[in-house]
Image (cartoon, rainbow, N blue to C red):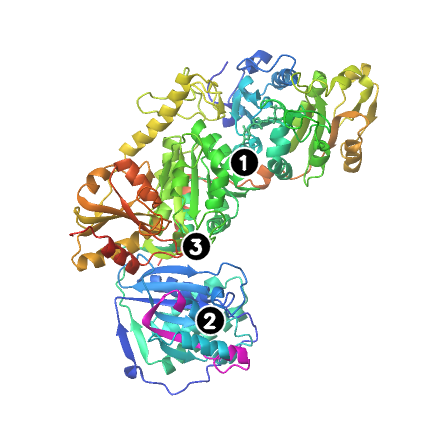
Amino acid sequence: MASSSAAAPAAKKKKAKTPSPQNKSIIKVAEHTVEVVSDPGEGAQKCAQTFGRVSAKMGNGVWTVEIIPAEIQPPPRTPPSTSGNRVRIGTKPVTNWGDAAHLVVAFNEQVLLHRHRANALNDDCAVLIESMWEAHDDEDIRKEWAAAMEEMSGKRYRFIKVPMEEQCLTVVDNPRKGKNMFVLGMLANIYSRNLDLIREQIEVEFRKKSQAVIDANLALLDLGHAWAEANLDFTVDVPIEPPPVPMVVMNGNQAIAMGAVASGMELCAMYPITPATSASHHLSEIFENYGGIVHQAEDEIAAVGVAIGSSFAGKVAFTITSGPGLALKTEFIGLAVMTETPLVLVDVQRGGPSTGLPTKIEQSDLLAAIWGQPGDAPKVVMAPATMEECFLCMITARRIAEAFRCVVMVLSDANLATGVQPFPRPNVTRDWIAAPLDLSPVPDGQKPYDWDPKTGLSARIIPGRQNGMFRATGLSHDEDSKIAYSPDVHERGCEMRARKMAVFQQSLRPPKVYGVDHGDLLVVGWGSTIGAIEEAVDRAREEGLAVSSLHLRFLSPLEPGLKEIFNRFTKVMTVEVNYSDDPNAPYITDENRRRGQLAWLLRATTLVDVDCWTRVPGHPLRPGQIHEAIRAHMPKGA
Amino acid sequence: MIQLGCSLLGSAIADDRSWEMDDYQAATARWCSGCGDHAVLAAVQRFLADLQLPPEETVFVSGIGCSSRFPHYINSYGFHGLHGRALPLATGIKLRRPELQVFVVMGDGDCCSIGAAHWIHTTRYNPNMVALMLDNGVYGLTKNQTSPTSPKGVRSNTQPKGAFLEGMNPIATTLGVENASFVAQTGDWVPDHIYAVLKAAYEHRGFSFVRILQRCPQYTDQLYLNAMRDSNTIELLVHPDGVDVPALKQIYKNEVYHDPADLVNAFRLAQLDDKIRLGVFYRNDDLPVYEEVRRVSPKTADEKIAILNAELDTYAL
Ligand SMILES: Cc1ncc(C[n+]2csc(CCOP(=O)(O)OP(=O)(O)O)c2C)c(N)n1
């Protein structure tokens, strides 16, 4: 972004030899993947996100993934400082970040090297790179450039040197802030993006800045566009098929925040933690308009305690966190289970254990979510798989929590949290929104835990209702909420709290198999991997492999009918972003092998010998990787 | 007696119910005989009856400990929560149902050790509620371990040679927290004083922190023995804005006229260890109250839908 007010918007002087559009080759493809990478602060993210949003607005399928350095200010011009985005656009809806990029814009050769080393670039990737470093005054920089080029020489990358800095200097005095708009202009030209839409987007994003800043950014946009028009010999055409229904585009954390609003919940109690926090940032901006508040508590324990207090008082609330925070909330989750106080808890998973990989995706909290509380603590654990589901699951979660007087955990992850994807605009309805409090007197004889012995369900009583006074307690208690340590009372309480989860499970529909409902291999996944898994399955089926997949939204209790589905396949294998031992690694036997977390669960539940293929790279799985894993894991003789 | 509705629904509904002390009694208290908690419970029930607080609009929240059994013995709504975590629960209740009368009961381990973060921060949030910290200088329920308020040298099962460190001073600590708005001390053996402090605490707008010196006949029977036997060890802090119980003047000759608005003097008095001081150390009714700071105007479902649709427009393609 340009922050200089010394802008000279009219500075489009460098109209070089214009290769007439006819001379340009047009690369017409069904999908294309582009990455924009820079040092932090140079705005590659803003550039790529704007590109993604505008592409979505124009009607392309889009999926974006953030590339984030672990530190706020890593040393510049080093591979670890790489910051940016991948944007995959397609004619059809795009469900994952794909394999390798077809085009990359790099603000220096070191961040490019990072992508090269991560195998993120296609063998013949087009590389638009800032040219200023090659002949830089600083000899060290020149050497670094040469070494990087040497390292990448094994690939057939097509390097196109772009004088970004030189160009931007014609418009602003600090090109470090502004190159990203120049790059956006180039991308707009390459992909024929609608410039008016981009201008609109820039004006929205910079609405808090002065007009001079906005003008400078618009000038840089035009400059980049003109430069690409004059100097590049190709354009990319990803045809647009306008979606049949109205769409919205947002990232998973925004979707969770909006879904929370749509659910009618009015309190989010949280403590900041990546990658969950941005949901509460978003909520903090809008929640009060809806009569809701975000309470930033002194720690995660207090946050969940405040949420439970609010729920107990009648207003079901939620808390949002990530792994380390989930660990701290453990004891309170148990209290909510024991007192049957509704609670929605969102865990935006990151790499673990401990502080782990704060900004990176992992699916390692599944078993902690289900079993992590000492004592038996039955609850609902669900996992959205897409941005749309991030929105919808908050509404579902609030309703389940209330109807079943239980804890509902929503497991999102860093991939959903920061990824952007268009989805059909939700049609908000009244019954999504929590009903007003019922403060009528409690009928005589109704007990605070009036368990229906068959279902374990009971009606919740809230303060303010006459004739209903009771003392909720985390101690073992009877129907009257009286402390009772006798064996039968404790067993009965455990049974009732478990029973209602079984009742809930019976209300679920069996999951749908993606592909043919029988075959050699069934791949089972959960959470944000759905797109990559299904794309891999499609590719494998094209090769003639009898592979299908199944994606679970409810992990506890598990969706019904799994055993029956599994029995129709020779082999079942989970694909997950969590750690499992390679069965061929030293010391690993079938008995001591640590397995993927869903695999443990499925094995225990179905007694089927479910295998797993899992990775913890800190980035989303690529369909190509999964495709290879499918090939490698096809049952023998298949 | 009109059984329809609840006064929370609006003042238009007549409510001619009334409550005796017994009406506030739920389960029979199971504390040891001679435990100071009994006296506090009786004072609280008397207070509830005198103020005629509707039981259904009153919520007692506690942590875990002997003292935290309190809600089970009060016929109101109650939440017997987790060790150290009563205050977040109470804050949550107050944030979304500010019309409820919320009382918190904690032990000294509960409040000053495991729950210390919440004690500090709830003081700073300053929600409008009354917090009673029943300080027996020991962990009672878990059978005699050193507490942060155990005086140096007092023996326990975990520090059999005597507590290694000086005990904390909960009054001074609370006074040191930004936004502290009501800090008082009373003792279980002076029921009239408990009652008066409770009333002042309840009438205060904000977070009222009341430390109640409480005898544990089982483990710390010596702790307040002197205080009970020798009235000379006590000094009453009296003031119209704090408490002033004329009946006590017969017993306690030492009294100091202390204006609870005077924070500097409150600190000085809290730090003197020559006498046990009972009364209101500090009171400031003008500090922002969290649930009021965070109050937002409620929206109907239709209003929410309209705003949400407008919001979704900004994400529309
Ligand atoms: C997380 C947790 N840690 C420890 C305990 C065990 N525990 C129960 S009560 C208590 C201390 C009680 O002392 P205090 O808070 O002073 O209350 P009192 O019993 O003296 O009234 C402890 C350590 C617990 N219940 N939960």
Q: Is disc 1 placed on a helix, strand or loop?
A: helix
**Chain ID for label 2?**
A
Whether callout 2 and callout 1 share a subunit is answered: no
Element on which disc 3 rests: loop
- State which image quarter holds ligand 1: top right
Residue that mark 3 sits on: A360
Depth order, front residue of B162/A308: B162
Q: Residue at x 16, y 46 (%)?
A: A518
Residue A413 image point, x, y percent: 40, 50
Above or below: residue A587 compared with residue B258: below
Kindly identify which numbered label has been placed on residue B95: 1
Residue ranking furthest to the front: A587
Q: Which amino acid, by three-letter code, is at mark 2?
A: Gln
Q: Residue A324, position in %: x, y?
A: 49, 45
Same chain? Circles 3 and 2:
yes
Which of the 4 image quadrants contains residue A16?
bottom left
Q: Camera-side residue: A243 or A498? A: A498
Q: What stretch is highlighted in magenta?
A: A116-142
**Mark 3 residue crowding within 10 angstroms, few (<14) / some (14–19) / many (20+):** many
Q: Is residue A482 above or below residue A303?
A: above
Q: Give the chain letter at badge 1.
A: B
Q: What residue did someone put label 2 on?
A: A110
- Residue B131: give its label: none
Q: How much space separates mark 3 and mark 1, taking CA atoms?
A: 34 Å
Secondary element at image label 2? helix
Residue A536 lies in magenta, yes or no?
no
Estimate the x, y position of residue B221 in percent, counting from the top left.
Answer: 70, 17
> Along the line of sight, which residue is nearer the eye, A628 or B38?
A628
**Pointer 1 local density, CA inside 10 Å: few below 14, some 14–19, many at least 20:** many
